[in-house]
Amino acid sequence: MSHGGKRPNSGPKRSMSPFGEKTSVIRVPASIKEDVLVYLAAFKKDKVSDLISPQNTLSAALAPPPLARPVYSGKVSAGQSRFPSPAQDYEQKFLDLNERYISNPPATFFFEVKGNSMEGAGIFEGDTVIVDRAVKPKSSSIVIAAVDGEWMVKRLYKRGDSVKLLSEHPDHPPIAFSEGQELTIFGVVTYVIHQPK
């Protein structure tokens, strides 16, 4: 009796991935494992509500090239004050936006905002927030957080054992955390880039 040869349906069994397609095994540094898991959880849950989508998340370059643009020493009026004529000469300097707004490039990320829950803090739908993962979050910081795999921008509230994520809009109640609920603070919002209206 022969025992050799290929048997039908033999070989390793493959289970369907939660992403609906074939997957590949990758190795990541232990220091960023939690970050990768947060990204994957957000993709898998595919929530939409007041969410900041990972598809719209852009990482800053590790060494962004300098891009110095002209900035004038004269000021522009946004009120009733009168300033000298634009015809007068002003000293022209150069400003690199990377230098001004990104203090730690490897820890800096950009998120596009969806939803209106932070309008009271001056963050509107379509704005881009600059997020620094190296800044330690504290109570009252505006943060990017992942709650059960859903990305959101909120104000962090910490008082004793109480931790909440607060909105800046009356239609969005605070998010309080119960036993077993997962909260990951991704980083602190340092600047907001407004979308022109």
Image (spheres, rainbow, N blue to C red):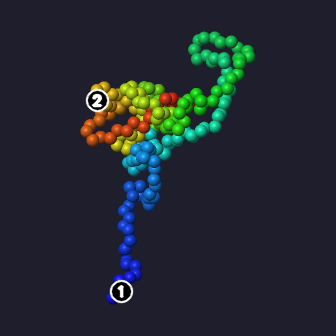
Which residue is farthest front? 30
Image side of residue 63 versus residue 153, left or right: right
SS at mark 2 in the image: strand
Q: Mark 1 points at which residue?
A: 2
Mark 1 crowd level (few <14, some 14–19, many ≥20, 10 Å Cα)? few
In this rendering, is residue 80 above or below 66?
A: above
Position of residue 55 measured from the top left corner of the image (x, y, whole percent): 49, 45
Query: What is the CA distance from the residue labelled 1 to the residue labelled 2?
Result: 69 Å
The percent coordinates of residue 189 (x first, y second) are: 46, 31
Q: Which of marks 2 and 1 precedes in the sequence?
A: 1
Report the residue at 49% width, 42% height from top. Answer: 57
In-front residue for pair 26/158? 26
Q: Which residue is drawn at 46% across and 50% down?
A: 28
Q: Is residue 192 left or right of residue 37?
A: right
Query: What's the amino acid at mark 1?
Result: Ser
Q: Quadrant of residue 15?
A: bottom left
In the image, residue 3 sits, relative to residue 78, either above or below, namely below
The front one of 11 and 148 is 11
Q: Name the residue under label 2.
A: 162
Name the residue: 38% across, 42% down.
150
The tally of labels here is 2
Q: Quadrant of the C terminus?
A: top right
Residue type for callout 2:
Ser
| Quadrant in the picture for residue 20 | bottom left
Q: Name the residue furthest bottom.
A: 1
